[in-house]
Amino acid sequence: MLALLLAGILPATATAQLPESSFDRSGAGDRSRVPTPTVQSERRHAITGNLILGLAGFYNVEYERRLGARTTWGLAGTLSVSRAGGDYAYRTAKGLFRFYPKGTALRGPFLGFRVGVSRVSDSRYDTGRYFVLGAEVGHTALRGQHFVSSVGVGASRPIGMDREAWRHLSLTGWRTLPVVRLNIGVTF
């Protein structure tokens, strides 16, 4: 939350702070000095965490790296921490791929896909490991020079989890789980 507040206060890079090579010299005079982004000045990595899951006792971290102008890949992991002496545990590790249609990887709207492995257990039942496939849509925004926020919605589909596991975990027979993301973090 502090990062979101700071992102609104911290100034973005001023034109005078940009390297000389990032200006377009197509016109005459100082008015033609319009900054144009260069690949070297773009951020290539982002590390974020999900605020919504953190409030519920689940801790999530994502690493995302730019592949090209429109695509990124990354890794995500989630771990639950039992509250009030419970023994509920949720663990997942996923790989992700995101497509940014505007050609600005790590910035703007995206369509993402995930694949990974999860495990859910408590004192009475263990689902074992099962595969998870998922899709999401969202938007990533740079906040200042080093802060990033990302919001998104989507769905995940466990593959290989039997019906008994679904009933035990009180998932009301749904075979697809909703995903809500509100991540904040740093970019470099």
Image: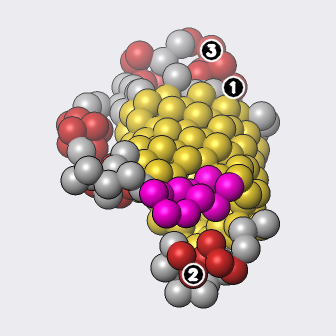
Label 2 or label 1, whichever comes before in sequence order: 1
Spot occupied by residue 172 in the image (x, y as percentages of width and height): 53, 87
14 above or below 155? above
In the image, is 173 to the left or to the right of 60? right
Residue 124 within the magenta-colored segment of the rendering = yes
Spot occupied by residue 145 in the image (x, y as percentages of width and height): 41, 27
User: Which kind of residue does numbered mark 2 sit on?
Assistant: Arg
Label 2 or label 3, whichever comes before in sequence order: 3
Of circles 2 and 1, which is in front? 2
Residue 21's disc number: 3
Residue 41 within the magenta-colored segment of the rendering = no
- Residue in front for this viewpoint, 100 or 47: 47
Spot occupied by residue 127 in the image (x, y as percentages of width and height): 64, 61
User: Which kind of residue does numbered mark 3 sit on?
Assistant: Ser
50 above or below 66? below
Q: Which residue is mark 2?
A: 167
Residue range of the region highlighted in magenta in the rendering: 119-128
Residues at marks 2 and 1, CA–CA distance in whole angstroms = 50 Å
Residue 39's disc number: 1
Element at label 2:
helix
